[in-house]
Amino acid sequence: MVLGWLLALLVLLPTAHAQNDAYAPAPPVLYPEGVKSFRDVIFAQPLGFRPLTLDLYLPADPADGGTRKPVVVFIHGGAWRSRTAREGGAFRDFPAVLASVAARNYVVASVSYRFSAEARFPAAVQDVALAIRWLRLHSDRYGIDPNRVVAWGSSAGGQIAALLGTACGVSTFEPPDPAGEKASVCVQGVIDWYGLIDLESDGKDLGKPDVPDYVNTYLGCKLSQCPPGWARSASPFPYIDAKDPPFLIQHGAADTTVAPSQSKRLYAALRAVGVPAELVIYPGVAHGFAKVPGGGPDDAINRQAMDKVFAYLGRYFPTDRKM
């Protein structure tokens, strides 16, 4: 398992300048208020793997001569084994949601990463870190403020976002940089939606009778047989300290996929060292902010969740656009 991780580390090659030094070739998707989305922009090509891409949502304000904008990096869920950069829980049109963030004068990047069947932990975290590095290296082109980067993840993406927010400078999550293009992969804010945070948890704590297979696959070992400390290293708890950025944590109280106790535990650990953190638990709401029963989109809860996101961004990463 450790050998597999080392091999994955060695073949991860960023392509910040070699690949896609311009916008994606396809015409942009247009959204209200002048937002343009360029889809499937390649940010890295790991040797032996599929290209890694992101969808870029750019506000109407031009990059040249304008105020640098915070960048919000969205990390999709899917148990680290599925889903796409255009999915975010039970929303009817999640790309439109991301465009609504960009309309408030943020650059938004929704990123892909290697799934657990392709490469085990920490590959997915390193892939998102590579996307953050790519965005910083292209900050002039896209009008990004490299000092204001927010990681926003849902479900499995929430775990990745929480690690990026707490493990700044930890070599395990630092992607290889053979081109010598030094750029930080640390983030200045984290939004965690119902993330599976504690990888040492037993099945009951995760809302399951046993540890789900997708957790074992992600770790590359059965939880009961993993090397000592391996599962803990995939959770933010060993890295939390007072220097961590502000967190917004949101979770449904009726979530049976990831127990709300996961978010409560993260919130308690952050607050214990003085990190600014807000925890919002939505009564009667399932995983993905879905309705109970039925599992379909809950438009009212989705609006509440996004209002919280906008309030968080407005407080810690204000722009010249009203929230």
Image (cartoon, rainbow, N blue to C red):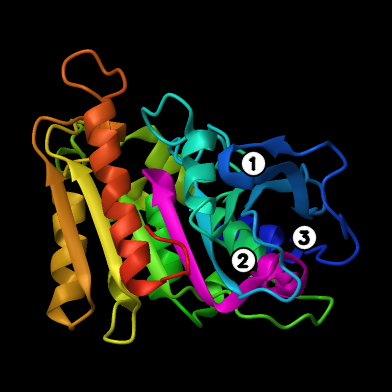
Q: Does residue 5 sit above or below 218 in this rendering?
A: below
Nearer mark to the viewer, of 3 and 2? 2
Distance between the alpha carbons at the discs numbered 1 and 2: 21 Å
Residue under the image location 53 percent in, 60 percent down:
105
Q: Which residue is mark 3?
A: 11
Nearer mark to the viewer, of 1 and 2? 2
Neighbourhood count class around disc 3 (C-alpha, 10 Å): few under 14, some 14–19, many 20 upward: some
Distance between the alpha carbons at the discs numbered 3 and 2: 18 Å
Q: Callout 3: helix, strand or loop?
A: loop
Residue numbers of the magenta segment: 132-157
Is residue 134 part of the magenta span, yes or no? yes
Give the label on residue 132, or none. Answer: 2
Q: For the N terminus, which image quadrant? A: bottom right
- Residue 200 position, x and y percent, is 27, 55
Identity of the amino acid at label 1? Glu
Q: Which residue is mark 1?
A: 118
Q: Name the outermost residue toward the right.
A: 18
